Image (cartoon, rainbow, N blue to C red):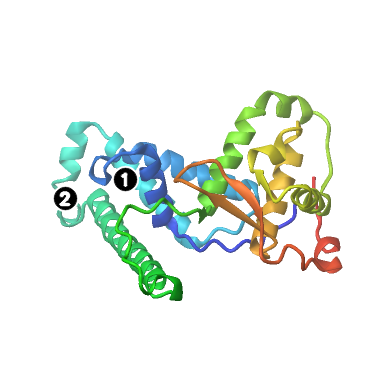
Amino acid sequence: MYRVKFEIFEGPLDLLLYLIKKQEVDIYQVNISDLATQFLEYIDMMRMLDIEIAGEFLVMAATLLYIKSRELLPVNQRAVDEQDPDELEIDPKWELIKKLLEYKRFKDAALELQKLEAQQEQVYTRESKFQESDTSPQPLMPFQASIFDLLTALNAVLKRFQTRIQDAEIIADEVSITEKIEFILETLKQQPVVLFSALFEHMNSRMHIVATFLALLELIRTGHVKAIQHQPFGEIQIHRGPNFNQLEPEFVTGHQTTN
């Protein structure tokens, strides 16, 4: 299978915060057992796509499984374990929650700084020099979808077409990543924006869906397309990227097939 060279800038804490936000629960109230299950599902999806996984994700997976195993112990057995001096020193669940809270504060602070910088740029533009600053709430700006958003969208596509995929899996199918890259580019030549889900509308083979997703990741990586959302967990739109019109012949011919 073609190995995606898509660099994942987000780490395991980003994925955990993403899952918690998706559940709409407080960090203190999070169910570690459910969180571990969902975390492993994303790891499995990345493995299925042959995306390179950083070691930190595997360490976090092991940590979550350890915490989950502790929580599954009978109450009386847990009480015995907690008498162990080593267990009294560090509660792994609380340590994880503290890490998440600290990381969330860091991310929130960084986001606020970005917002302030954007506001300052607007205030000091030549057009607004002599205008009163607008203090009304600003609409949420479109933002780049993360790898986790893309994996969530892919999972929804796979589930939606599950029956048709199972029927099609009986026949071995070789799919060209090159053809899928050309398909996405041709689609965006016809229209500047297309919904993520629309790319997979007429596909009834798992390999065609996976190959299209891998092609999309490659085009995002090279800046030929952008994956945009207008609200958290909203529908993903695929836009032409800054390099859309700079496609080199070698870019397309250098890709492999999935089978």
- Residue 118 is situated, as x and y percent measured from the top left of the image, at 40, 68
Residue furthest to the front: 130
For the residues carrying marks 2 and 1, which lies nearer the camera in this image? 1
Mark 1, residues whose alpha carbon is within 10 Å: few (<14), some, or many (≥20)? some
Number of labelled discs? Answer: 2
Which residue position is annotated with label 2?
Answer: 84
Quick one: label 2 or label 1, which is nearer the N terminus?
1
The image quadrant of residue 159 is top right
Which residue position is annotated with label 1?
Answer: 67
- Write the residue at 64% across / 38% down: 197
Identify the secondary structure beneath mark 1: helix
- Residue 250 is situated, as x and y percent measured from the top left of the image, at 84, 68
- Write the residue at 74% across / 55% down: 2
**The disc labelled 1 sits on which kind of residue?**
Ile
Mark 2, residues whose alpha carbon is within 10 Å: few (<14), some, or many (≥20)? few
In the picture, the quarter occupied by the C terminus is top right
Side (left or right) of 79 relative to 47: left
- Residue 241 is situated, as x and y percent measured from the top left of the image, at 66, 61
State whether residue 54 is above or below residue 210.
Answer: below
**The disc labelled 2 sits on which kind of residue?**
Asp
- Write the residue at 35% across / 68% down: 131
State whether residue 130 is above or below residue 37.
Answer: below
The image quadrant of residue 113 is bottom left
- Residue 251 is situated, as x and y percent measured from the top left of the image, at 80, 65
Q: CA distance from mark 2 to mark 1?
A: 16 Å
Identify the secondary structure beneath mark 2: loop
Camera-side residue of 64 and 6: 6
- Write the residue at 16% across / 40% down: 80
**Mark on residue 152?**
none
